[in-house]
Image (cartoon, rainbow, N blue to C red):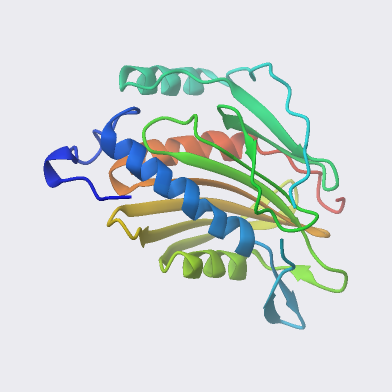
């Protein structure tokens, strides 16, 4: 994959779906999201972090009916994206039956072939600009506990990147983190990776949006829509 010449690179924030640089950057994001899928399940025993189990994707039925727009705010966002060149995509559900976690993704979610054994992982490329989205739920081995913070650090390490922000969050009574990671691809693209990890009894769930730095405003908007639609069982179940 060759790096585009400087004349091919639009000014920050001006990337549009279908431009040459967006296609290059999106392809890079698709490849790099695999790192998060394989290292997001980090667990801790007696306070010491260790890597979770490894790689077979299982199919999860995905209805072909688009999800409703959730609010006037989302309607305005979609209109803004369309004005910027986005071709509207259906918002489709994905779920993990073991944990009861579900999410909605832009475009058709595709199961990742490199998913760890027993886990669920999907990615989709229907979001605007250069943004690629990812959803995954990972089982935690018996006797271990999920460690979202360490998972975020491991995810950054697989990309040779750095965590610039980790904010604690609570989702339906479960602890989690919102993470911002900066990294650079081998082709020279400066990328931003936004992830929400949620620690569940027996599982670690994650929802992720990756895009080039110049698209960060849209990236943040996409991630916010994704986390708003993320559904997990009420605290104490799973």
Residue 163 in the image, given as x and y percentages of width and height: 44, 65
Q: Nearer the viewer, residue 134 or 152?
A: 134
Looking at the image, residue 227 sits to the left or right of residue 163; the answer is: right
- Can you say whether 68 is above or below 220 in the image? above
The answer to whether residue 53 is seen in the rendering is yes
Residue 40: horizontal and vertical position, in percent?
63, 61
| 89 to 229, vertically: above or below | above
Q: Position of residue 134 (x, y in %)?
A: 57, 44
Please name whichever residue, 183 or 187, is drawn nearer the observer in this view of the structure: 187
Residue 43: which quarter of the image?
Answer: bottom right
Give the residue drawn at x 32%, y 37%: 22
Q: Residue at x 42, y 18 (%)?
A: 87
**Residue that sits furthest to the front in the current view:** 1
Can you give x and y, in whole percent of width and height, for residue 186 in the image?
A: 33, 60
Q: Is residue 24 above or below residue 51?
A: above
Residue 109 lies, with reference to residue 205, above or below; the image says: above
* Residue at the spot 63% in from the left edge and 61% down from the top edge: 38
Residue at position x 73%, y 28% in the image: 62
| Along the line of sight, the residue nearer the viewer: 216 or 190 | 190
């Amino acid at each position: 994959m060759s790096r585009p010449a400087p004349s091919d690179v639009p000014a920050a924030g001006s990337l549009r779906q279908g431009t040459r640089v967006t296609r290059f950057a999106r392809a890079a994001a698709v490849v790099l999201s695999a790192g998060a899928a394989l290292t997001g399940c980090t667990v801790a025993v007696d306070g010491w972090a260790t890597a979770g189990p490894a790689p077979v994707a299982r199919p999860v039925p995905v209805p072909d009916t688009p999800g409703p727009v959730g609010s006037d705010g989302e309607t305005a966002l979609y209109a803004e994206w369309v004005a910027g060149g986005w071709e509207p995509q259906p918002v489709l559900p994905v779920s993990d039956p073991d944990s009861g976690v579900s999410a909605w993704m832009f475009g058709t979610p595709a199961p990742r072939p490199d998913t760890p054994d027993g886990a669920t992982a999907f990615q989709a490329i229907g979001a605007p600009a250069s943004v690629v989205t990812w959803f995954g739920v990972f089982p935690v081995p018996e006797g271990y506990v999920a460690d979202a913070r360490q998972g975020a650090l491991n995810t950054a390490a697989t990309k040779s990147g750095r965590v610039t922000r980790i904010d604690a969050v609570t989702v339906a009574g479960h602890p989690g983190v919102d993470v911002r990671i900066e990294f650079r691809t081998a082709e020279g693209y400066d990328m931003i990776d936004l992830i929400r990890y949620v620690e569940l009894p027996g599982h670690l769930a994650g929802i992720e949006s990756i895009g080039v730095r110049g698209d960060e405003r849209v990236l943040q908007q996409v991630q916010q829509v994704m986390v708003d639609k993320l559904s997990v069982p009420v605290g104490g179940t799973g």
